[in-house]
Image (tube, rainbow, N blue to C red):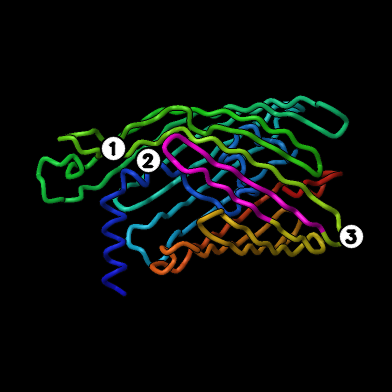
Amino acid sequence: MKKIKLLFSIILLTTISTIYGQQDPQYTQYMYNMNILNPAYAGSKGVGSIGILGRSQWVGVEGSPQTFTVSADTPLGNNLGLGFSIIHDEIGPVKEDNIYFDVSFTIRTSEEGRLAFGIKGGATFLNVRELRLGEPADPLNTPVNQASPNFGAGLYYYSDKFYVGLSVPNFLETIHLEKGNGIVSTASEKMHYFLTSGYVFDISNNLKLKPSAMLKGGAGAPLSVDISANLLVDNKFEIGLSHRLDDSISGILGFNVNQDFRIGYAYDHTITRFGNFNSGSHEIMLLFNFNRRNIKSPRFF
């Protein structure tokens, strides 16, 4: 079994350009981490907030994806929102850091509904370690350090019970390595789009059901669909299930320490054959809200 795991690790490393070029970091608790994906979300909760997330994917596979994010957003006046995010992602020999600033503008569409427009701008910093492959001329044998600008945009409609968002976090395709000798050896990050939606059903005074969904697509990558349902008890404890179609099933736990601080955990179990060679994925999130107790109609997403 150890030899098979090692083989999968080698395959993961040697195909790093394909994997990395087709995948943005995955998030199971995306419903609480939305300004990473959609700049229009910035300031929508009416209070300042900070989110910290750590994710270890495919535990047991050497070189598997590791993700760490820090994000913050706050309203500015009645219509503007500001956001900031840092995304650190590692997979095999590749380390990537993204730093973005978000600006959103919100208009009221009805007594309860609001529509926000957002843009994000920043830079991607890429570091690729030397792999020491057999061919000295192979470009993967040369370390890479590179910075590239990028920008994105999004729309976000929301009320106290419902939201739907559409976003493209990265418009520009960044090519990290070049082709040579007829062999594709690039690690390009292509444009991805995200469609997210969710609703809060009041089952009783102390029980809320929160279904949500996320669709992710991009050029050269298969469509990824996440379907989730969380149950909130006494506005305190949260338990949920999520299914990433043809990929994994997940369990989600959440605990609201108070109105301003939430702790969340998610475990993903891979349901494909690759699940035989890894121990799943773990994701922990801390969410801090400031002065949320002063909001008359607090949001649950």
Vertical comparison of 241 with 155: above or below: below
Point 32% across, 47% down: residue: 94
Marks 1 and 2 sit apart, C-alpha to C-alpha, by 8 Å
In percent of width and height, residue 31 lies at 65, 48
Work out whether mark 1 precedes mark 2 in sequence or the reverse, and give the earlier one: 2
Q: Quadrant of the N terminus?
A: bottom left
Residue at the disc numbered 1: 186
In percent of width and height, residue 53 lies at 54, 53
Work out whether mark 3 precedes mark 2 in sequence or the reverse, and give the earlier one: 2
In percent of width and height, residue 206 lies at 86, 62
By secondary structure, the bulk of the magenta-drawn segment is best described as strand
Q: Residues within 10 Å of mark 2 (few under 14, many from 20)?
A: many
In percent of width and height, residue 19 lies at 37, 47
Q: Are marks 1 and 2 in contact (CB under 8 Å)?
A: yes
Magenta stretch? 208-228
Horizontal side of residue 115 vs 172, given as left or right: right
Horizontal side of residue 152 vs 78, given as left or right: left
Work out whether mark 3 precedes mark 1 in sequence or the reverse, and give the earlier one: 1
At label 1, the amino acid type is: Thr
Secondary structure, mark 3, is strand
Point 69% across, 27% down: residue: 80
Q: Is residue 194 magenta?
A: no
Marks 3 and 1 sit apart, C-alpha to C-alpha, by 53 Å
At label 2, the amino acid type is: Gly
At label 3, the amino acid type is: Ser
Spot the residue most to the bottom: 1
Residue 204: numbered disc: 3
State the image quarter where residue 229 is shown. bottom right
Residue at the disc numbered 2: 21
